Amino acid sequence: MLRGIYPGSFDPVTLGHMDIIKRGSHLVDELIVGVLCNNAKMPLFSVEERVKMLEEVTSDLPNVRIMPFDGLLVDFVKEMDAQVVIRGLRAITDFEYELQMAQTNYKLAPEVEYIFLPTNLQYSYLSSSMVKEVAAFGGDISQFVSEAVIDRIKERYREIKR
Ligand code: PNS
């Protein structure tokens, strides 16, 4: 049984993430999307909210499971009895950071392998930070995130402005 972990902050999940989840789910028997409880990064959504949104947008993918995690990625990979980590690469600028992270993790846990999937060209510019920036100023984010997520973001910014 090949189990993969797709880790990230997913604050919030974008169409680019969804594309990687779908394609990644075809490469392994089970794909666990690991949602980092990164309170230090001051996320817009709590980890519970991010997990819920991911569950909604992946409900049609039977071999995908969403789990929160804290601490080191390699510890989470071992805890989940997974063998590979999947990450998306949007551009060369992602590569340096991703390579450094993978190589650090390789030092910590040489048995864990990495699979890098090139992001679909359609989403190569897309990031959660950009989505939040556009949404914060009332812009149209319908090309960036799923409908369920649009409503949550709008609601969150309404709450913040109150
Ligand atoms: O979506 P992101 O924010 O680019 O995801 C980054 C993530 C969650 C993959 C990375 O920050 C991570 O793995 N954090 C867990 C802590 C860890 O293991 N750090 C050592 C890796 S160098």
Image (cartoon, rainbow, N blue to C red):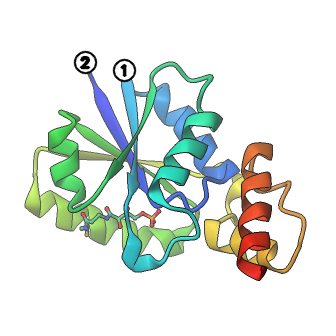
The image quarter containing residue 128 is bottom right
Question: Badge 2 is on which residue?
Answer: 1
Q: Is residue 11 left or right of residue 144?
A: left
Circle on res. 96: none
**Dots 1 and 2: beta carbons under 8 Å?**
yes
Q: Is residue 55 above or below residue 112?
A: above
Q: Residue furthest front?
A: 162
Which is nearer the eye, 79 or 22? 79
Q: Amino acid at mark 1?
A: Asp
The crowd level at tag 2 (other Cα within 10 Å; few <14, some 14-19, many 20+) is few
Question: Badge 1 is on which residue?
Answer: 29
Look at 53% across and 52% down and name the residue there: 50
Disc 2, SS: loop
Look at 55% across and 52% down and name the residue there: 49
Q: Is residue 119 left or right of residue 29?
A: right
In the image, residue 81 lies at what x, y percent? 18, 33
